[in-house]
Image (tube, grey):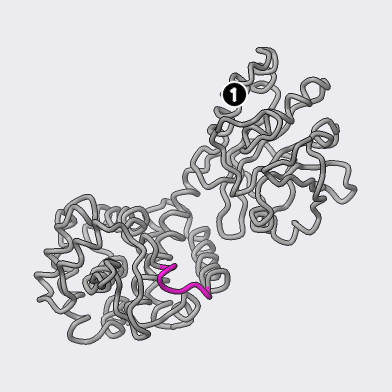
Amino acid sequence: MSEMQLACAAMPLNAESSVYALVAGSREGMKSLLGSRSENLQRRIDPLEWAVKPEVRCLIGDEGADVSIQEDDRETPQTLPGLAVMLLYLRYQAHLSGWTLLPCVSLPHNAAHLQEAMIACALHWKLPAAFLQWLVTENTFASTMTDCAEWLIETDKPLPVPEIAEAVRYVRDLQPYALRKQWMLGGAGVITAAVGTLCGMNTIGAIMRDGDFRSLLGKALTEEIMPGLKISREEGLQYAARVCAYLENACGEEAWPAIGENLLARFVACVLPALAAYEKENAALPSCLCFALSSLIMLYAGVRKNAEGEYRLPTEEGDAPVLEQEYALAAFSRMSCDMPPESLAYAALSDYEIWGCDLREIDGLEDKVTDQLRDMQLLGAKSALLRAAGL
């Protein structure tokens, strides 16, 4: 057999090693997904030989294993769908039972994408119609999502999977958990980067160790974001604690510009929906989420192109590059952090190129941002943070 482009390993699913899963993807991806369990992997296996072992019950594609289809060479598949079809066809020919297939790529409905790609691959290879029927009816495709050391699997029944990333949790619908991750984990990352960097802190670890910032972030998560998710307070508080621990421990060494990559797009995806939901529900504005917006405006209003045509921000340690869409940076480069606050708020919030909408349409937001920008200019970023958090 030619060398596989995808790394493939076997992992026991029980203490007796009588049931196994095959894990496919990159070696780094396996380590990231499995954590300490990756030490139990049997590496350098022949996946063709393992495909026909009755004790193999599932195939896991790690986070780096693409679920899209390419024009694979049938003998050396380049993607997870090609590998899965090749192995399952051997299993079908051996009259063995099907597998549970668990893709872990960060993509909504990743199991449906995998199944669609596998069917297309089987058709491309002109495999028998009976195999296609077996593929659909005798194999289980379950979408998954990793989230703060928890591995969520969308199913209404337990599946033969190992304890990966400390905990496996079966849920009937991933969507509420995906939204929780988007608003709370994604939102926390945006707030940390924008507010912490503006306040002169260089790494996520340093930002998270600042007591005043933690108060602002805690209020944003538990009082402003969490109610819009319609989850129980107990679950929300537990998840907020996990988010903070994840940022401080797993991401503690990350610094600008990495923590600010595509910060505007992340704000629009993660924070803006929560801000709008809070305003609609309460007919009032969430002070901490608005402060994240004001911080982002004040931070990026200082962006300028250097002689090499690269957008950079001034920091205490010198100019730093900005990893952001150029059209948005071009819009901010026409502003200045020392503009009158009402002019800066108007210029930033009304710019469709930055947000994809006119944020002044959110009732009261322009006045709120104006006041917070004024606090930053007169009192400094840290004192403005204290006022926004009610400290």
Q: Image point 69% across, 60% down: which residue?
A: 35
Q: Is residue 107 left or right of residue 318?
A: right
Q: Image point 82% across, 50% down: which residue?
A: 42
Q: Secondary structure at mark 1?
A: helix
Depth check: 98 or 181 in front?
98
The image quadrant of residue 201 is bottom left
Q: Is residue 155 left or right of residue 259?
A: right
Residue type at the position of mark 1 = Ile
Q: Which residues are magenta?
A: 252-259
**Dot 1 alpha-carbon crowd within 10 angstroms: few under 14, some 14 to 19, many 20 or more:** many
Depth check: 337 or 20 in front?
337
Image quarter of the C terminus:
bottom left
Image quarter of the N terminus:
top right
Please state the horizontal and vertical placement of residue 280, each as a whole percent of the image: 25, 52
Please tell me whether residue 357 is drawn above or below residue 219 in the rendered image.
Answer: above
Q: Which residue is mark 1?
A: 119
Please tell me whether residue 47 is drawn above or below residue 369 in the rendered image.
Answer: above
Q: Image point 65% across, 12% down: which residue?
A: 129
Please tell me whether residue 338 is drawn above or below residue 147 in the rendered image.
Answer: below
- The secondary structure that dominates the magenta segment is loop
The question of residue 312 being in magenta is answered with no
